[in-house]
Image: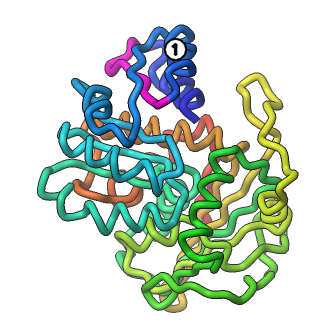
Amino acid sequence: MLRRICGAVNALFHPVPLAFLPVLSGRDADQLKALEHETGWEARPASVDDPASLDRALAGAAAVINCAGPFATTAAPVIEAALRARIPYLDVAAEIEANVDTFARFADRAREAGVLVVPAMAFFGGLGDLLVTAAARDWATADEVHIAYGLSSWHPTAGTRTAGAVSRRRRDGRRVRYAGGQLEYHDDASPILEWPFPEPLGPRSVIGEFTMADVVTVPSHLSVPDVRTYMTVEAARDIAAPETPVPAAADERGRSDQTFVVDVVVRSGDAERRAVARGRDIYAVTAPLVVEAVGRVLTGRIEAVGVASAGEVFDAPDFLRALSPHITVDPRP
């Protein structure tokens, strides 16, 4: 993911000279040296169990993007370092429990320090939240939010598998859903439903209550008691199978051949509002999402401080328009 973010930074600012020069950090000094040689950007090795090294890594920085999972281990130490440095923090955490921890542990401290902390600024958690916010428009409350992920396949990275294993251990193998305004944990099997994806995907079987980070980000600023997320059966089977390979590049931009449709429904009473995003390679979308976000943070285009999700911090419709090279967004009546 660090390599993808480096590419996204180049794409965002090229051919304009960089207003902010990235600094590379991580615990693997050899990989950092290779990236330093490739990009020409400074590398500063650091480890989350060494606060002094994190302070050295963030010295003089304007913001920090944490893309090193599992975030159950890395988020809190890097947020602590960001608070000490008084700089904004963003991460790409898809782990539900890690994102809950970030809101619970740092909301008051970040707000009092005047520091912005944006968790889950990624495909899961960030994109869904932006789509829901854009669809809801002037609604501050809603009865239900549904986010259906139509992935053609899902070849997980090693980081995705590690993060998933950490989350399963934290919830004792139970599944989680957001209902009645709170997270609930269940031992029963998830239902299999039919979801009417728009063309060209069409109706597909989905795992109901295949819960993703959106159940943390969306209710953090939209008053809604029920948030449900769904996943196409084929993609759910892929990520559950230990033999599924990691993503492989299938085009000149390094993207895999995975395609996706994200179908969002927001309901209030008898009214319904929808939005749809389409694109290719969920991992290739996370990088431009978080880089666009940090660019907006550093240029003052934000609407919140403290711990806040994408939909609360940014102008959601404008943000989604800025992602047009990577995804297409179709607001639906």
Q: Which residue is mark 1?
A: 33
Tag 1: amino acid:
Lys
Q: In this picture, which residue range is highlighted in magenta?
A: 16-27
> Which is nearer the eye, 82 or 283?
82
Rendering coords of residue 315 (x, y %): 37, 52
Splitting the image into 4 quarters, where does residue 281 fall?
A: top right
Q: Looking at the image, which residue is at 78% across and 40% down?
A: 247
Q: In the visual, does 333 lie left or right of 129?
A: right
Rendering coords of residue 210 (x, y %): 67, 73
Residue 238 visible in the snapshot = yes
Residue 45 vertical placement versus 125 (above, below) = above
Secondary structure of the residue carrying tag 1 is helix
Residue 331 vertical placement versus 140 (above, below) = above
> Which is nearer the eye, 76 or 154?
76
For the C terminus, the quadrant is: bottom right
Q: Looking at the image, which residue is at 68% across and 53% down?
A: 161
